[in-house]
Each structure stands twice: as C-alpha cells, then as structure tokens.
Image (spheres, rainbow, N blue to C red):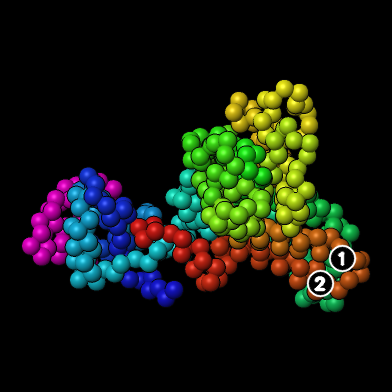
C-alpha cells in the first residue's frame, strides 16, 4: 500500500445505505483552510449546523471539528453529518475530491492514529475485532483488549531492560572495565518471565479460539442426532429433522453463540455408503469441513453398542481432534458418567460444554481470557517470545556475552513488534487491510 500521510483524506464512516443520518469523516492538516470553499468550521468540539452548497446541491449538515492533536488521528478531523441518501453522500465525497481531499484507503484513519502515537498496534487490532464481532463474548473480548497494554508487557520490559544494558556493557567494555554477566543470576532473574509467558500462552490460545469462533463439525451415521444437536446449539430450526436416514444432503453452516461460546457449526451429511447420487455428493463434501474444523464431534446414539467401525476408519485422519459424543442420553439405562453424554431434545448439554472448554479453551472460562492476546499475529509473536526466553534460560555459564546480548535484544525486538513500535510495513498492511474505509 503506497500512502501519502500528508494528504487530507475522507471516507463515509457509516454504510452507504438509505438511512436517517450518514457521517462523512475528513482528516488532514489545516482543514479549516482546505474546507473553506465548502463551509466555515465551528468551534472545536462544538456541534453546529452548516449549509453545504456545491454543484447544484444544498444540504444542511451537523458539523463537528476536532483540531490536532486532540483528535482520533492526531490530525485535524472534521465530521459531517448529512441525510443518509447514498447518492448524496457519494456526490459530497466527489466534491471533497475537487478540494484536494482524496478517498481514504481501508483503515487509513486508524493507521494515521497509530503513526501519530494516538494508539498502539494492540489497540488497533482490538478495534478491528470489535467492529467485526458477531457475539456478546467476542465484543467483550475485544473491548477488554481495547484499553491499555496488557500489564505483563510492561513487566517483561522492566525485567529485560537492565539485563540488556548489562549484557551490552559486557560486550562493549567487558575487557577494559572487567564487566561480566553472571548466567546463573540471569536465569534467576528471567525465570518469572518464563512462567508468566506460559500463562499468557494458554490464555491467548483460548482467546484466539473465542475471537475466531469455535469451529465444530458434527459427524456420524444417519439418524445419530446431528441435526437435532445442530438446531439446539444454533437456537433455531436450521436443519430438517426426520426419522428418514439421509435427510441432510449438504453441509449446513451457522454462526451463533451458545452458553457464552461463539460457535461456527457445521452439520454434515450422514457418513455411509449410499447409491443416492445427491446424498453421495453430500458425503463427499464432508471431508474438507472436517479438515477445517477445530473439533469433530463424532455423534453416536446412546443405544448403540459403539461407533460404527467403518465410520471410525473414515475419521482416523482427524483422530487428534475427534470427540465421541453419546447422543439421546435421555433414553432409559444410559449412564451420565459414560463419557460425553448429551440429550439435545431435553437440553442436557452440560457435558458437551465442559468438553469444549477443556479441548479448545484449555479448561478456561471465556471470562478468564479477557485482555489476552488473540490474533494470529499476536499469538505467533508470543510463542516466539517464549522460545527466546527458553533459549536464554538454556545458556551455559562461561558463554561469551555476545550470546545473551543477542538473545535479549531479540526478545526486546519481539515486544516492539507486538505493540507496533517496530513498524514493519508488510505487517501493518496485513492488519489494516481488514478495516472499513471510515476507520
């Protein structure tokens, strides 16, 4: 993305759909002068009515002005609230273009906020997740990350900084001044970081699942209760439920939240040999879904002696993520302690909830993940950071000071990349490509 950060930019901050009000946002330097042919700006942070006239149009707008640096982007920002006619908004944007105000790239307002020190990269990513959230849990997770940096980042810097200074002094002046670095003392000092990183890794893996939604594929023989469970988790009748085997011919997908867990559910065709050409197509589509799922729930009716051996063989490639779930647990004689036993018909799904939390959230409740790192980029950097500390703790006494100095600098650099202080353009492009124009 080639950006010109000095250019004034504009974009609709609301969808281009018929509505009561539409908001057009402008950011740049000296907007009072740039916008003077269209309007006179009101006093800072005071809403005022202005009449906008251009190209035969005459529109009454509510105008807000936020001078630099006390604005979202750190530049002058102006918001124009006009009637929500998409064509009117488009004509206004075109007129702003004639004043030298170009249309913003996706996420460019927030990118300028980052570059101008108004937000760090962690806050930016939390904002993106907040806008995209589809469930209550995802909203709360994003809001918890939208404030200050996690406390452990500051704590890690506080631990690493003096050791970095000592290691670099040992490299630069060790021979002349007799400065050395005691590896055993270093290990003692860094040991708490190792434990803290392990805790954050566990929380972050769970938070990543919550952010993306738990992808659950329901698999099993025909009439194993897949569609009934699917409808119960989704909270609506999305799949047809009948006594006739092979009713589900295609993969059904729904996004929902269930007991605080954001789910991406996939109801698949019953796995069996069949001569029905339509049903065979449905069975053929199951494999890609199973590959993409975080967890495959192999549903087996409680009355069956065990799972179908042919079906077990079909699920062998996914053995590491298959959980056997006994359905129709309300039948007489079914022991509730026999593994994951559920009754979708009766709403008895506690065992399934516990299994999901254990397998995908590491046994954590969603609220225990509030504030944890959650994006793929963040989790990857946290994993690298933990490995860097492991390398430091594995150093042997008497090693040259250049080695701990290099590893300490590497750990510090990973923290800088995490917060966005090390602003690699390719990484920023990837983050901001998911934003809408008005952000």
Question: In this view of the protein, which residue sits in the foreground, 371 or 117?
Answer: 371
Residue 177, percent from left and from top: 83, 73
* Mark 1, secondary structure of its residue: loop
| Residue projecting furthest to the top | 332
Mark 2 burial class by Cα count in 10 Å: few <14, some 14-19, many 20+:
few
- The quarter holding residue 88 reads bottom left
Instruction: Let me know if residue 40 is in the magenta part.
Output: yes
What percent of the width, then of the height, locates residue 143? Answer: 51, 44
Rendered-image quadrant of the N terminus? bottom left
> Residue at position x 72%, y 53% from top?
315
Viewer can see residue 204: no
Tags 2 and 1 touching, CB below 8 Å? yes
Image position, residue 368 (x, y; %)? 65, 39
Residue under label 1: 395
Q: Would residue 385 be visible to someone looking at this image? A: yes
Would you name the residue on which mark 2 appears?
A: 403
Look at 31% across and 53% down and name the residue there: 15
User: Viewer-proximal residue, 179 or 39?
Assistant: 39
Tell me what residue is drawn at x 76 percent, y 54 percent: 313
**In-front residue for pair 319/48:** 319
- Residue beneath the point at 16% across and 58% down: 39
Above-or-below relation of 55 to 45: below
x then y, percent, for residue 362: 72, 44
Disc 2 element: helix
The part of the chain drawn in magenta is 34-61
């Amino acid at each position: 993305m080639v950006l010109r950060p000095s250019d004034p930019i504009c974009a609709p901050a609301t969808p281009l759909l018929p509505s009561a009000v539409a908001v057009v946002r402008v950011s740049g330097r000296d907007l009072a002068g740039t916008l003077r042919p269209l309007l006179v700006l009101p006093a800072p942070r005071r809403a005022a009515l202005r009449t906008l006239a251009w190209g035969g149009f005459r529109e009454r707008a509510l105008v807000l002005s936020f001078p630099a640096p006390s604005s979202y982007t750190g530049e002058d920002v102006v918001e124009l609230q006009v009637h929500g006619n998409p064509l009117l908004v488009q004509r206004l944007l075109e007129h702003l273009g004639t004043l030298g105000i170009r249309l913003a790239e996706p996420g460019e307002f927030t990118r300028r906020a980052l570059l101008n020190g108004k937000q760090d990269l962690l806050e930016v990513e939390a904002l993106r997740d907040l806008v995209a959230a589809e469930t209550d849990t995802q909203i709360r997770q994003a809001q918890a990350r939208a404030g200050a940096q996690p406390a452990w980042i500051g704590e890690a810097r506080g631990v690493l900084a003096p050791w970095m200074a000592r290691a670099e002094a040992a490299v630069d002046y060790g021979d002349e001044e007799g400065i050395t670095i005691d590896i055993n003392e270093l290990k003692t000092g860094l040991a708490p970081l190792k434990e803290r990183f392990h805790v954050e890794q566990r929380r972050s893996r769970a938070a990543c699942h919550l952010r993306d939604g738990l992808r659950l594929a329901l698999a099993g023989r025909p009439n194993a209760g897949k569609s009934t469970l699917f409808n119960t988790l989704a909270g609506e009748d999305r799949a047809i439920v009948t006594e006739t085997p092979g009713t589900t011919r295609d993969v059904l997908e729904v996004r929902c939240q269930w007991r605080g867990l954001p789910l991406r559910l996939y109801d698949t065709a019953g796995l069996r040999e069949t001569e029905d050409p339509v049903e065979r197509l449905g069975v053929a589509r199951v494999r890609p879904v199973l590959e993409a799922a975080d967890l495959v729930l192999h549903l087996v009716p409680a009355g069956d002696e065990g799972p179908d051996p042919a079906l077990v063989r079909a699920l062998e490639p996914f053995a590491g993520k298959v959980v056997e779930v006994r359905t129709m647990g309300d039948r007489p004689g079914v022991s509730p302690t026999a593994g994951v036993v559920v009754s979708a018909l009766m709403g008895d799904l506690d065992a399934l909830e516990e299994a999901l939390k254990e397998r995908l959230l590491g046994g954590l409740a969603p609220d225990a993940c509030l504030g944890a790192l959650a994006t793929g980029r963040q989790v990857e950097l946290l994993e690298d950071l933990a490995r860097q500390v492991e390398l430091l703790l594995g150093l042997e006494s008497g090693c040259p000071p250049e080695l701990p100095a290099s590893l300490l600098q590497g750990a510090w650099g990973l923290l800088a990349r995490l917060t966005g202080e090390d602003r690699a353009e390719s990484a920023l492009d990837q983050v901001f490509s998911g934003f809408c124009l008005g952000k």
